[in-house]
Image (cartoon, rainbow, N blue to C red):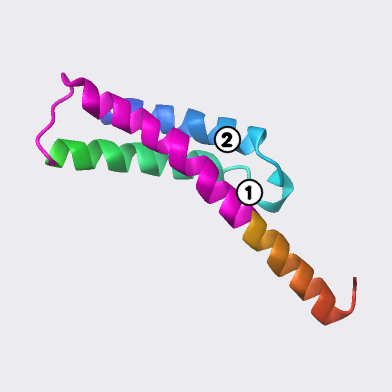
Amino acid sequence: MLVVLALVFGAIAGAAAHYALPLRSLRGVAAAPILGSLLGAGTWTAMTWAGMGPDTGWIWLTSIAVPVIVTPIVLLLASRARAARDARTRRDLGIA
């Protein structure tokens, strides 16, 4: 049941990253919290499978740190790719 905390922490980190980073109009409002939740739960699950229990600090640290670090990187890359694709499409259509 403690994996739910990893989901919540990941969603909070994703929502914070969504509003803190530029180009937020190019991505959906739910993309960042969902990505953060998946990263948090995935990290928790991987650490559990590696034999760590909820009483160790590493599982908590990594389950919070991975979404905080990886989510903004993925969002920046996705937003830049979307902006480039939109510009290319506008150029191909003769709009800009």
Residue at point 42%, 27% (across, down): 9
Report whether 14 appears left or right of 50: right
Q: Nearer the viewer, mark 1 or mark 2?
A: 2
Q: Nearer the viewer, residue 32 or 50?
A: 50
* The C terminus sits in image quarter: bottom right
Q: Is residue 62 magenta?
A: yes
Q: Is residue 61 magenta?
A: yes
Residue type, label 2: Ala
Residue type, label 1: Gly
Q: Which mark is residue 28?
A: 1
Span colored in magenta = 50-79
Q: Is residue 84 visible?
A: yes
Q: Residues within 10 Å of mark 1 (few under 14, many from 20)?
A: few
Location of mark 2 (residue): 17
Q: Nearer the viewer, residue 62 or 27?
A: 62
Q: Is residue 81 above or below residue 37?
A: below
Q: Is residue 91 above or below residue 58?
A: below
Q: Residues within 10 Å of mark 2 (few under 14, many from 20)?
A: many
Q: Is residue 9 above or below residue 28?
A: above
* The N terminus sits in image quarter: top left
The picture places residue 27, in percent across and down from the top left corner, at: 65, 51
